[in-house]
Amino acid sequence: MTRVGPRQAKSYVELIREWDRLAEERHRQIASGEDLSFEHVVVPTIWHLLQGVDLTVVLDIGSGTGDFTARLARVSGKVIAIEPSRTNMEAARRVCQTSANVQFVERILEEAGDLDEVPVTAAVAVMTLMTVANLRSFAKALAAMLHRGTSFVATITHPWFWPRYWGYEGEPWFRYDAEIFIEGPFAISLCRTELTTTHIHRPLEQYVSVFAQEGFQLSALVEPMPSENVQALYPA
């Protein structure tokens, strides 16, 4: 069984290959409702943060299998789904086949400079920032695409509690205040796979400071918890 542990920094090519391998299983987890955290914590939080936001043209960054993209398309004028994994994009096209207002862009955000002139009114990144190889390059590219006052909503795993959940909090190689590429089998509460993925641990301070330096202003910070009814669904 693959163990969770630190790795040297990985390129986007390496990271994309990991998500290519996971795409079909990831879609199954979400579509079946098996991913409890996604369905009952992440998605409700995104909807809460998008209240009052102009959804005329929404940039869905790291759109993955398109399961959230399809939902976003129902309440938006247009969704631009940007995703570098080809296998994920193929799944997303199937999931969103009845959504005529979705445009697919198969690239990483940093290489999508042609979108700079698109009148994006909002941007979302659902559980994406922990897989971004270079956070500063990402923030700089996003800042160039968004007009002043445009809302950007992102969800991440909590960098304080995620190490505890995965059991590496006390490992000698782990430091909360360091940026660390960490590799391990992809898992959700109800399902563990042997498909290896990499997430990048970063302290909250790094996220806030990097985006602030690129001109973003933090308007809301939410640390959601599942309701008691939902908590009862999680394995003991």
Image (cartoon, rainbow, N blue to C red):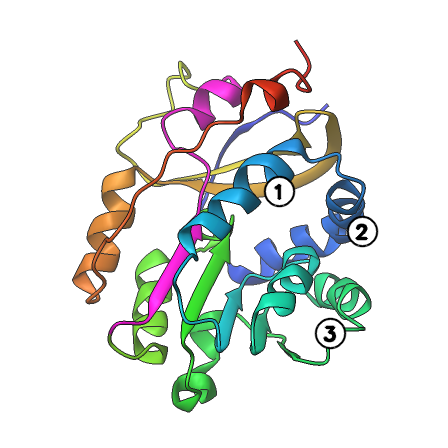
Q: Dot 2 surroundings within 10 Å: few (below 14), some, or many (20 or more)?
A: some
Residue plotted at (59% across, 71% down): 81
Q: Which residue is mark 1?
A: 197
| Identity, as a three-letter code, of the amino acid under mark 3 | Ser
Q: Position of residue 218 (x, y in %)?
A: 23, 53
| Identity, as a three-letter code, of the amino acid under mark 2 | Glu
Magenta residue check for 2? no
Q: Secondary structure at mark 2?
A: helix
Any part of residue 10 in sight: no
Q: Which residue is mark 2?
A: 24
Which mark sits nearer the N-terminus, 3 or 1?
3
Q: Which residue is mark 3?
A: 99
Any part of residue 45 in sight: yes
Find the magenta span and give its range.
Answer: 149-168
Location of residue 187 with respect to 24 vertically, above or below: above
The nearer-to-camera label among 2 and 1 is 2
Location of residue 104 with respect to 139 vertically, above or below: below
Distance between the Cα atoms at labels 3 and 2? 20 Å
